[in-house]
Amino acid sequence: MNYIGDKLRNLRQQLGLTQTEMAAGVISVSFYSKVERGLNDIGVNDFLEILKSHNVTPKEFFEDIIIKDNDEKKLNGLVNRFIKVATEDNDVEINKVIKELDKIKIQTPFIKFSKLAAKLIANTHDKKALKRLTTKQKNQIKKMIFQKDTDENEYYRIVILANIIRIYSFEEATFLVKGVIRRYDSSEKVESKTEVALSGLMINYINWCMELGKLDYCYEPLNFLKRLPEKIDLAFTKILGLYFGDLIKQKKNEAKEIRVILNKAGYSTFVNKIAK
């Protein structure tokens, strides 16, 4: 990517200067021309001297990067907030977060994907919404999750998959979950937030298995959940793993105790959605 060269050319055009005028005698015109085309790298001192010659500060020159970084920080906070309110089925807060997301103007692939992901989860975060989706809409969602420009957004892809897993047939979902387990079992290092997303995917899939009475399908994701690190961020899903494990082992009293604790902790909306 020829970021500096492109930015210098855009700045020169905004100032209405020729390449000779833009080079300002700091470097040769032929060298400067190659900088704009990405064929030469400009030294820091020469770069700063050219900016100074045209009364442009480095802050002004890199302003779009600063805006982009600020937008991405804001985006991360909004997405984390969104995941929480989507889990709670809080439609009012969901719509508030989406309005805040729409205010972010910078349109990088990362930001565009995150906005799309939030709106997708908003429209599919409960069973009633899922039932309203047409076959065409489901196919569009499936395609969106795995399109090429989301490769750098693995975390968000897993978050989406965890929330819309039921748009797939149970067989398709099982194939996807097994693939995810194989992939991350062999990964040496996984980001903490991705571990949280993975644990959420396992819990949602296990809950579905429990509802269908397909208990044999629960063991692999439960074991994967147990192998995740003992971190505070994973406490909630690990407790749910214990809950489902107790149900499978017919330890009804232990499972009931976990439900009581989760209700007291304020997770009643979520508790009402999980299998008994």
Image (cartoon, rainbow, N blue to C red):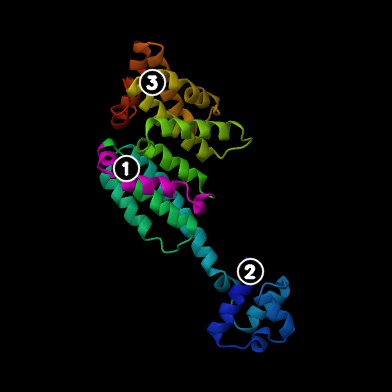
Q: Which residues are magenta?
A: 128-151
- Label number found at residue 214: 3
Residue 78 on image: x %, y % = 40, 50
- Label number found at residue 124: 1
- Label number found at residue 2: 2
Q: Quadrant of the C terminus?
A: top left
Residue 25 on image: x %, y % = 72, 87
Question: Residue 253 or 169: which is nearer the viewer?
Answer: 169
Task: Say left or right for 276 vs 106.
Answer: left
For marks 2 and 1, give the CA distance.
40 Å
Q: Kindly identify the residue that appears in the image at 53 percent across and 49 percent down.
A: 151
Mark yes or no: residue 98 visible: yes
Q: To which quarter of the image does residue 207 belong?
A: top left
Secondary structure state at the residue bearing disc 2: loop
Secondary structure state at the residue bearing disc 1: helix
Check the image and report above or below for 163 versus 254. Answer: below
Q: Are marks 3 and 2 in contact (CB under 8 Å)?
A: no
